[in-house]
Image (spheres, rainbow, N blue to C red):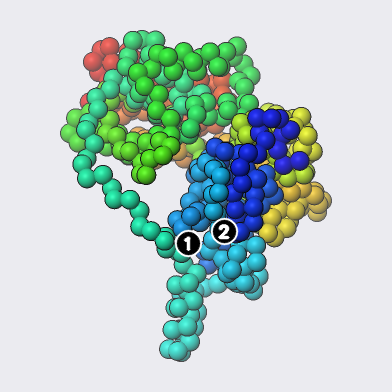
Amino acid sequence: MPRLSDPRFTPDCTIRLDGTAIPARTGEPLALALLAADRPLLARSHKYHRPRGPFCLTGTCHGCLVRVEGQPSVRSCRLACREGLEVATQHALPTAAADLLGVIDLATPGGLDHHHLGTSSQPVNRLVVALSRRLAGMGRLPDEGPPAPAADAPEVEPWEALVIGGGPAGLGAAWALARAGRRVLLAEAEPRLGGRLRGGDRPERLEVDWPRLAQQAVQAAGEVACDTSALGLWRDGGAPLALLSATRPGDAAPRLRLIRPGAIVLCPGGTAVPPLLEDGDRPGVLWGRGLAQALAEHGTLPGRRAAVLGTGREAHALADRLLQAGLPAVLVPAAARALGRGRVRGLLTAEGERIPCDVVAVVGPPAPATDLGRQLGAEAPFDPAVGAFALRVDGAGATGVPGLWAAGEVTGAMDAGRAIEAGHRAGEAAAAALARGAAHG
Ligand code: FES
């Protein structure tokens, strides 16, 4: 059962992968159509040609790259399906499923030092250099070049406040700012608002009507810009500037926007962290939150038996959701190794227990996306609870950089309820600073 049996998720078009017809649903992400068709192996890695497949399902890991109609390295989790889409696996000889160069990984279990390989003889060295060129890069060059970039720089748009990220914290911040009468631009990189709430994660402690709150934030904000990523933040003498990249369906190239906000609240969350276990990069190993979203919004069931790798409330909730959807799922607190080659076939624990599965859902806090905050000088010390660097903020979300607040998982691990509280506090603090005329320096 690759999809929930619900008329909303019934395939209505056909795409082709390496010449094989695959049923798909118009508009669903390509990676999900391929997972539902039991095709998680999409490419081979640089150098060792290890099997590659989707992992995060949210556009940040680059595991899902494929060649689409002559364009290499397209993120299949970001591309919508349509009738007749031609897709090819890439960086393989001849295909990812039957890659002859996969022998490199098998033959070099201890690694391959290409810096010193074949350097003793000139003819051998030439051969090795030619081979290295073949192994480097990802995919073949595109059939056609990219569209010409826009000739003119975008106009600067003044806004009272910019909230980056439309998950729980961003919604809380936008809501607070808009309620204080501020004109807010809420930018979200994904096609929809909600972040982890989209996968069914609900806060434990707060009695919050999430759909209503999201609606209020949307209604009160000056603009909600989905499919809009923040590329950079910097100062050019006065208030910070933000460069946004907006992708609309049908656009040949992203549209750039230059924003000068009086206050910025950073709520970008974080990126998926691959599991720390041997062979944890096997196709079929998926980020739990991405899988939860795929199940909730597209009915995707990417296997026949799942292992939820992790502990705590989020892991239990995901295992329950998978079971309710008809996908047998077991909770595995920790594992030493993933089994299988072209796709995951099980987990091996440190005690030697083998747990058969063809899907592994990895649960754990994301790595905080601190880059934008650090661009403006915010501090990001190491957070042992997350095992990563997180933005340092005070109780009101102030980063110590004038005009810049942060909230949610970019500041450390927290559940969705605490994230919205933190976002709300940061939004209120930013609104108060705007009222005092003290938001940016
Ligand atoms: S970027 Fe597509 S699965 Fe991670």
Q: Secondary structure at mark 2?
A: loop
Q: Position of residue 102 (x, y in %)?
A: 62, 68
Amino acid type, residue under disc 1 in the picture: Met
Residue 153 in the figure: left or right of residue 20: left
Judged from this view, the residue extending furthest toward the top is: 180
Q: According to the image, label 1 marks what residue?
A: 138
Residue drawn at (76%, 29%) of the image: 324
Q: Nearer the viewer, residue 374 or 171?
A: 171
Marks 1 and 2: CB-CB under 8 Å? Answer: no
Residue drawn at (73%, 45%) of the image: 303
- As measured in the structure, the alpha-carbon distance from the residue carrying label 1 to the one carrying label 2 is 11 Å
Q: Secondary structure at mark 1?
A: loop
Amino acid type, residue under disc 2 in the picture: Thr
Kindly tell me whether residue 61 is visible in this rendering.
no
Label for residue 395? none
Compared to 253, does 72 lie above or below?
below
Compared to 398, does 50 lie above or below?
below
